[in-house]
Structure formats: structure tokens, C-alpha cells
Image (cartoon, coloured by chain):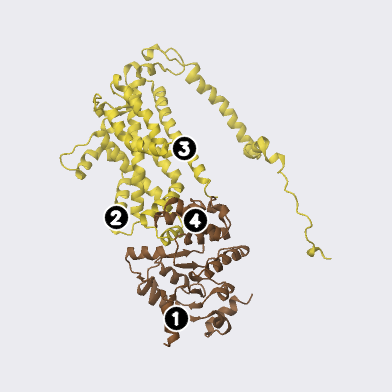
């Protein structure tokens, strides 16, 4: 019998992989010490970390001071955190009346039940919570601005991180649907809708946000009835939303283009009309692909809320600027801006982690 | 027309009537003067070289492609640009694609219940019952809660057939349903299609599976350069092809 006509009598059993390629040792070998140059880089990185981490910890905690009335009370080499005690409220709430700040806190706490049903899947009572989220903007507006027995607080008293959150979250919640409509409009077969979408996207994307904010009090009245005047925070929200949704539209357009035409055809062949096929078939897939770009736009938008300073509103960065130029605390810019950065980082990092979690969860659906 | 023929056409009314159909892609004349009448319950297999317009022809029947000249009447409804008519036709015509086109973000059963729920307004529970019935018919009820990406090509195509059947169509269009499949999986899909043919469904099938054509087709159509070159019963078509182009085509696909 020739070798080529041999048949396998028994299949070979599957074996586990070699020890050195799995577990901690395998991970270390593959990721940190895979070659001479990588080993050298790993050792240099470890050395730099041993220098940096103790120095940072020392400046922030060990050699820092947290009490005192002015910066001249700080007698230490590390950070001077004494101002936090005096100014913390201002950083959070701006010039919102101290006795009414509990309303902001309640509005903030209520934000979570309003957001969670949209961010998760299968939360108990999701249906009722969604109705709550629809009512939330009204509830929050009343809590923040007053009315219905609550003392009225004019919006020029709004400030601090609260202002960043109000503008940022409103912009995020509004720019996604507007961006979706613009992206669909840009692909529309109807020329007027397509031209409007392209014109809007290109015009808004082509100018810096800061100029949009400057001209908002000239630009917006063109689109409004003559005797309507808009509150400056509403104006900012509209401009930030317009700006972010132009970027959003392009991100989502990328996702739409990645959907194979067979998906559109299958949806149409089943008799689904345009809006149903978009809502049920195309957008769920296109948005999933676009998650990284969408979150990118969201974090950009959130950080851009600091630009409200150009129209005279004092967000957390505005308060920080004011404090740094106050004679009592002059020169504490490192401490102040590190403190402000922590707030932005906390929010943006949470968004980024959430999007990674969401991608993983949705990723399970397609292999 | 003699008596027996006119009796026959009374009993079996045409559900698809195509007259003088012409279509261009840009300046390329892809369908040229096509006329075709399909009676209820008839099974028609369309074959031909690639680029001959056979897929385009069946895609015109549910208006996935728009024709420029001629008339297409499906189940008494004429296809024009009128969206109402298009939707009405699409509700009655199921389509199975070469690349399956299942919705990857929905589970198998959600794929099957989507159109009944959103287009036919079938209650949820009823739609699921119907979906399970058809999934059993294509022999994969146990995969109902998996996602398309977890299934083999043959299984995906069977789900696609079940998904179309859930709309209870009067006509089924198949656009090269086995061309994207591994050889081992072609049979399981053809078996389902034979089964469907036996149940009396009106079918138009673009395929090169000549065994299938011989087994179920009432008529075999050979297309080349956008026209119907030959149309005959399978026996005549395979035994006694008329045109040279048909003979060449058959010799090439049957030579293995």
C-alpha cells in the first residue's frame, strides 16, 4: 500500500497550548519582554515611573497644605489647597444663591434615573423611567430657574461646573438626533433636503465655535420671531448643539456608508418603508459602528463648554481664571487648573469607559 | 388559441405579467424587450451567463430596480413610481438574496417577526408563533435565539427563506440563493426550496443548479445580453436546446 492512500485511523486529541504562551508569564513575555529593545523600553519606563509617581504624590498629598485664609498662609513646598475650602461652592455652582443650591443637587441626583434607562438594557421599570426622562428637562428647568413656588434664580447667576454640565448634557442629548437627521438628509434623494444638510454641515463645520458663540446674538434672531429674546444659556445650548451636530452628522454618515446595500434591499423587499427601515435596520447598525466617533464628538463638545466665557458666563474655568487673578490666591494656577482638569477628566473618562462597555455588549450580537 | 388552452389560462391566472420591459444602467441596455407571464403556482428557473440581466429582471418585479419602459403587473397591481403600489407589491412578494442579507443585529426569530409586526401589524405573540412554524419548516427551530453571525451559510439562507415566508407572500423570488454557499450546504437549501415548490408556491429562481431546474421547474428561461433567448419546459430545454448560445452554455455548466 502506498503512503498516499493511508487513512487516519484515529483523530489526534486537542492539547492545551505551551505554558510559556499563557498566564502571567506568557503575558509578560509577549507584552513587556518580547525582544531586546522592548525589554530596554520596559526598564526605562519602570525607572521613569519610579521618579514621577512619588514626586506627584508628594506634591499633591504629602507636602501639601489644605488650611489657610490666603495663599500667604501656605508655608509648604507642595500644593496649596487652602482655597478649596472657601471657593468649592463657587466652582460647582457659580453665583447661584447659597441657600438655594440644594435645588441644583436634587436636579443632579434626578439626572441618574433619567439617563439610566437610555444607557442600559433591561433595567427594572425601564418603561416608567423613560417617561420620567421625558419629563426631566421640565423638572430640571423648574428646579434650577425657579417658579411654582420656588424662588426664581436668573440664569446669569448660573455658573461653575453646573453650567458646564447643563450646556454639555443638553448639547449631547440634542446633537445626536439632530446629527442623525442631518446625516440622513445629506443622503436624501430630495435635492432641497440634501442641499440644506450639506450647506448646514459645511457652514457650521467651517467656522470656530467661538465665533458662533460671539455672533449668536446677531445670528439667532434671524430665525426667530422679532419680539422673542433668548436667554444667553439657551443661546449657548443652541450654538453648541448646532456645532456638535454638524460633526455628529459626518460621523454617522461614515457609519451609514459602512452598511452593505443588501441590508437596505432586504428591508425594502420586506415592505418596510424608509423611516421603518432606517429606525429598525440601518441606524441600529450604523450607530453601533459610529460609537467611537460619537463619543469623541461628545467629549469634544463637553470640553468646548468652557468657551461660554466669551459671552460673559462663568463656568468652572471662568471661576478658576477669576480666582487665579485674585490677590489673595495669586499664582496658584497649577493647583487651580489641576483641580478643574479633574472634573473634566472624570466626566470624559466615564463617557469613554461607558462607550467601551456598550461596544462590548453590542459586539456580542455579531460574531 | 384552442379550447383547452383558454380553459387552462382561466384556471391559472397570471400573477406576474411583464410586457415590453426595457431597462438601462446609465447607457448600458441591460434588459431588452422582455415579456413574460407567470401563472399562479408556476415555478420558473432563469439561467444565463453573468451580466445577462437575469438578476436585474427579478429585481424589477419587486421594484428594487426601476424600469424605464414597459409594464410590470404583479397580482393585479401595476408597478409605477407610486410608493403605495410598490409597498403593496412588496408585501406579496418575498425575496431571497445570494448574500442572505439577514439583519446581523437581530436574533433569528427577530429577523423573522420584524416585517409581520411592523408591516402587517401582526400581534407580537402571533408573529412569534408564525416564525417558529416557518423555522420548523426550514428545519432550524433550535437556532431561533441565536444571531445570524453564529450560523453557517446554509443555515443563514434557510433563515432568510423562513423570514420571507413569514410575510405569507404569494410569490417568492430567489436571486442565486446557493451561489455563496459551500458545496456541503447547497443541498440543505435546495431541499427547502423543493419542499416549498411542492407546497404550490409561485417561484422565480435565478440559479445554475440545473438538477433543481429539472426537478421542479415548469419553465426554464435562458437569458443572454438582456433578452430571453429561449424558454421551454425543462425536458425540452435540456434535451433539445434550440439556440447555439444555449447549447454552448449548457455544455459549459454541465461538463463537470
Image quadrant containing the N terminus of chain B: bottom left
Which label belongs to residue A354? 3
Q: In this view, does A99 lie above or below B245?
A: above
Q: Can residue A320 be seen in this view?
A: no
Q: What residue is shown with label 4?
A: B131
Q: What residue is shown with label 2?
A: A193
Q: Is residue A202 above or below residue A352?
A: below
Location of residue B147 in the rendering, given as x and y in whole percent from the top left corner: 53, 51
Mark before the other along the chain sequence, 4 or 1: 1
Q: Measuring 33% from the left and 26% from the top, which residue is drawn there?
A: A104
Indicate the secondary structure of the residue bearing disc 2.
helix
Q: Do labels 2 and 4 share a chain?
A: no
Chain at tag 2: A
Q: What residue is shown with label 1?
A: B8
- Circle 2 residues within 10 Å: few <14, some 14–19, many ≥20: some
Location of residue B142 in the rendering, given as x and y in whole percent from the top left corner: 58, 53
Q: In which quarter of the image is residue B138?
A: bottom right
Indicate the secondary structure of the residue bearing disc 4.
helix
Q: In this view, does B136 lie to the left or right of B3?
A: right
Mark-to-mark CA distance, 4 and 3: 35 Å
Contact (CB < 8 A) between labels 4 and 1?
A: no
Q: In this view, does A141 lie above or below A247?
A: above
Contact (CB < 8 A) between labels 2 and 3?
A: no
Q: Measuring 43% from the left and 15% from the top, which residue is drawn there?
A: A66
Mark-to-mark CA distance, 2 and 4: 39 Å
Contact (CB < 8 A) between labels 1 and 2?
A: no
Image chain in yellow: A
Amino acid at each position: 500500500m502506498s503512503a498516499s492512500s493511508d487513512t487516519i485511523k484515529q483523530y489526534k486529541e486537542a492539547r492545551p497550548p505551551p505554558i510559556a504562551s499563557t498566564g502571567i508569564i506568557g503575558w509578560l513575555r509577549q507584552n513587556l519582554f518580547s525582544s531586546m529593545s522592548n525589554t530596554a523600553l520596559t526598564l526605562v519606563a519602570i525607572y521613569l515611573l519610579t521618579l514621577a509617581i512619588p514626586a506627584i504624590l508628594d506634591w499633591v498629598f504629602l507636602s501639601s497644605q489644605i488650611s489657610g485664609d490666603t495663599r500667604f498662609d501656605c508655608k509648604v513646598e507642595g500644593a496649596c489647597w487652602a482655597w478649596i475650602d472657601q471657593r468649592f461652592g463657587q466652582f460647582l455652582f457659580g453665583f447661584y444663591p447659597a441657600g438655594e443650591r440644594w435645588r441644583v443637587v436634587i436636579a443632579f441626583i434626578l439626572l441618574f434615573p433619567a439617563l439610566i434607562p437610555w444607557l442600559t438594557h433591561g433595567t427594572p421599570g425601564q418603561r416608567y423611567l423613560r417617561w420620567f426622562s421625558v419629563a426631566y428637562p421640565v423638572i430640571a428647568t423648574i428646579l434650577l430657574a425657579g417658579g411654582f413656588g420656588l424662588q426664581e434664580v436668573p440664569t446669569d447667576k448660573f455658573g461653575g461646573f453646573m453650567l458646564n454640565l447643563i450646556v454639555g448634557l443638553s448639547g449631547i442629548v440634542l446633537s445626536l438626533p439632530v446629527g442623525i437627521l442631518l446625516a440622513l438628509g445629506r443622503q436624501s434623494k430630495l435635492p432641497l433636503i440634501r442641499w440644506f444638510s450639506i450647506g448646514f454641515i459645511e457652514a457650521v463645520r467651517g467656522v470656530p465655535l467661538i465665533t458662533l458663540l460671539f455672533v449668536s446674538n446677531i445670528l439667532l434672531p434671524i430665525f426667530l420671531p422679532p419680539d422673542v429674546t433668548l436667554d444667553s444659556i439657551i443661546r449657548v445650548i443652541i450654538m453648541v448643539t448646532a456645532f456638535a451636530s454638524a460633526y455628529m452628522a459626518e460621523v454617522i454618515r461614515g457609519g451609514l456608508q459602512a452598511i452593505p446595500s443588501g441590508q437596505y434591499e432586504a428591508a425594502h423587499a420586506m415592505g418596510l418603508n424608509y423611516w421603518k427601515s432606517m429606525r429598525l435596520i440601518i441606524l441600529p447598525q450604523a450607530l453601533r459602528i459610529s460609537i467611537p466617533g460619537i463619543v469623541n464628538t461628545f467629549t469634544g463638545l463637553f470640553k468646548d463648554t468652557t468657551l461660554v466665557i466669551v459671552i460673559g458666563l462663568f463656568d468652572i474655568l471662568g471661576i478658576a481664571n477669576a480666582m487665579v487673578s485674585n490677590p489673595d490666591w495669586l499664582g496658584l494656577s497649577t493647583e487651580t487648573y489641576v483641580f478643574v482638569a479633574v472634573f473634566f477628566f472624570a466626566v470624559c473618562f466615564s463617557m469613554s469607559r461607558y462607550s467601551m462597555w456598550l461596544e462590548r455588549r453590542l459586539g456580542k450580537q455579531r460574531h | 388559441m384552442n379550447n383547452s388552452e383558454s380553459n387552462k389560462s382561466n384556471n391559472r391566472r397570471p400573477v406576474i405579467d411583464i410586457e415590453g420591459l426595457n431597462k438601462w444602467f446609465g447607457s448600458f441596455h441591460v434588459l431588452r424587450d422582455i415579456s413574460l407571464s407567470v401563472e399562479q403556482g408556476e415555478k420558473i428557473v432563469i439561467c444565463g451567463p453573468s451580466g445577462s440581466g437575469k438578476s436585474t429582471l427579478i429585481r424589477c418585479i419587486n421594484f428594487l430596480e426601476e424600469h424605464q419602459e414597459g409594464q410590470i403587473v404583479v397580482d393585479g397591481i401595476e408597478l409605477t413610481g407610486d410608493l403605495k403600489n410598490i409597498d403593496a407589491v412588496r408585501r406579496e412578494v418575498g425575496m431571497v438574496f445570494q448574500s442572505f442579507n439577514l439583519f446581523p443585529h437581530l436574533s433569528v426569530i427577530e429577523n423573522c417577526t420584524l416585517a409581520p409586526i411592523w408591516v402587517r401589524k401582526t400581534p407580537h405573540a402571533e408573529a412569534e408563533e408564525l416564525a417558529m412554524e416557518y423555522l420548523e419548516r426550514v428545519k432550524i427551530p433550535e437556532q431561533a435565539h441565536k444571531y445570524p453571525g453564529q450560523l453557517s451559510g446554509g443555515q443563514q439562507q434557510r433563515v432568510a427563506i423562513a423570514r420571507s415566508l413569514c410575510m405569507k407572500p404569494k410569490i417568492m423570488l430567489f436571486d442565486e440563493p446557493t451561489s455563496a454557499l459551500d458545496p456541503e450546504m447547497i443541498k440543505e437549501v435546495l431541499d427547502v426550496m423543493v419542499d416549498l415548490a411542492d407546497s404550490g408556491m409561485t417561484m422565480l429562481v435565478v440559479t445554475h443548479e440545473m438538477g433543481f431546474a429539472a426537478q421542479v421547474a415548469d419553465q426554464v428561461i435562458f437569458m443572454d445580453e438582456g433578452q430571453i433567448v429561449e424558454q421551454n419546459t425543462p425536458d425540452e430545454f435540456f434535451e433539445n436546446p434550440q439556440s447555439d448560445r444555449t447549447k454552448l452554455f449548457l455544455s459549459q455548466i454541465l461538463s463537470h
